[in-house]
Image (cartoon, rainbow, N blue to C red):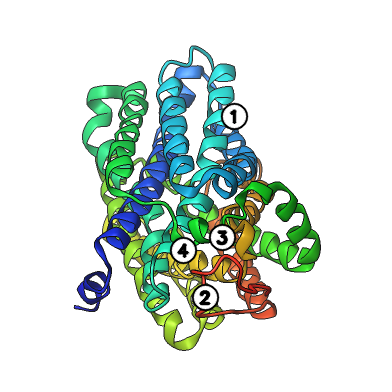
Amino acid sequence: MEFLGHFRRLTPVQRNTFIACFLGWSLDAFDFFILIFCVNALAAQYQAKVSEITEAIFWTLAMRPVGAFLFGLMADRFGRRPTLMVDIIAYSVFELASAFAPSLKVFLIVRALFGIAMGGEWGVGAALAFETLPAKGRGFFSGLLQEGYVVGYLIAALVYGALIPIVGWRGMFVIGALPAFLVIYIRSKVDESPAWLQGRVSREAENHLGKDIVTHLSSFLFLVALMFAFTSFSHGTQDLYPTFLQKNLQFSPHTVGLIAIIYNIGALLGGIVFGSWSERIGRRRAIVFAALLSIPAIPLWAYSHSVPLLALGGFLMQFMVQGAWGVIPAHLNELSPPSVRGTFPGLAYQLGNLLSSRNAVLQAKFAERRYGGSYPPVLGWTVLIIATLVALLTLSGPERRGADLSDMNSNSSP
């Protein structure tokens, strides 16, 4: 009922904008997670080790700051809406190109280009959404918007489980080009951010970005460090988990897809629950509770052997991981200077991604060299260390819950 109540309070323009931004992020994540499910198939295709294929994950994540910077500047200068449309077309084109890569080298190049486009979507979409939505219920919408990432993972799991035997890995990437059609909806149903239209400071966005980063350098560096911890938390629990289920437990694609569906439902619920809860107890407290509660789930999640227990462990783990993440869209936008909100939070997010971009490669190599290809110890230590880091960094930082995001000229200093 609370879910419906939040949506009933939105105007048609606000509702259409949120739906578009949610779908843009969901389909962006869908395109990314197709690769996660196809790691084994790609290793067989290119006659490479898993750790060599995970270089594609590294290049995607490493190039995301470039996209955050370029598309963020476009959003601050030319508007959120047209930039979002260009970005969606770009990541769809590079996803399609991935299907036809003739060699691993070409595949890595294409995935790097995909990373640029993927890096632009979150910051632009979040700015458009939160500059359009009302302040009341922002925590709820933050949780729901961030879980668009989980919905993308869920769709990828469904498509993988149902279609991989039929279409193969190349067909999966062809299907990943379908998000381009979302642009039609944005063009016909979505308006420009009212805050951007009011401010009209975008033509000086380049100057503002440098000035605001220097002025708020300590805050910017803190957000980068925080997002390093957060991206290590999510990618450390997501990227190699399907590979663990396939290689260590010899589960079929159907079983892997089923477990992934269950833990992504947990992730979706966690983001909404903790995002909404952050309206009452504060952003930082909600994040800390979620992060620390992931630690008791490690034994079920990484060391079980039966499908029901692994599904339960995955549900609990991702409920907590994405519970912490569900607070982030609102938290980062509330801490960002208004004149460069299209760039500042997205750039901090993606620079954090850059710092954690070799996570999957390091996990795979560590498992291969130290544990003979066994993933549970690596997965368990990752959660223990990173969850603690997320909690400590969050507690040490500021909070501006409820900040006015509708005014481009308001003081938004952390």
Residue assigned mark 2: 404
Horizontal side of 251 relative to 227 (left or right) equals left
Q: Between tags 2 and 1, which lies in front?
A: 2
Marked residue nearer the N-terminal end (2 or 4)? 4
Q: Amino acid at mark 3?
A: Gly
Q: Which residue is mark 4?
A: 131
Image quarter hosting the C terminus = bottom right
* Mark 4 surroundings within 10 Å by alpha-carbon count, few (fewer than 14), some (14 through 19), many (20 or more): many
User: Residue drawn 73% across and 68% down?
Assistant: 219
Residue type at numbered disc 1: Glu
Between the C-alphas of marks 2 and 4, the distance is: 9 Å
Q: Earlier in the sequence, mark 2 or mark 1?
A: 1
**Where is residue 265 shown, x and y percent of the image?**
29, 60
Give the alpha-carbon distance from disc 2 to disc 1, as whole Å.
46 Å
Q: What amino acid is at disc 2?
A: Asp
For label 3, count other residues whose C-alpha is less than 10 Å away and answer few (under 14), some (14-19) or many (20+): some
Label 3 to label 2, Cα distance in Å? 14 Å
Q: What is the CA distance from the residue labelled 1 to the residue labelled 4?
A: 41 Å
| Disc on the earlier residue, 1 or 3 | 1
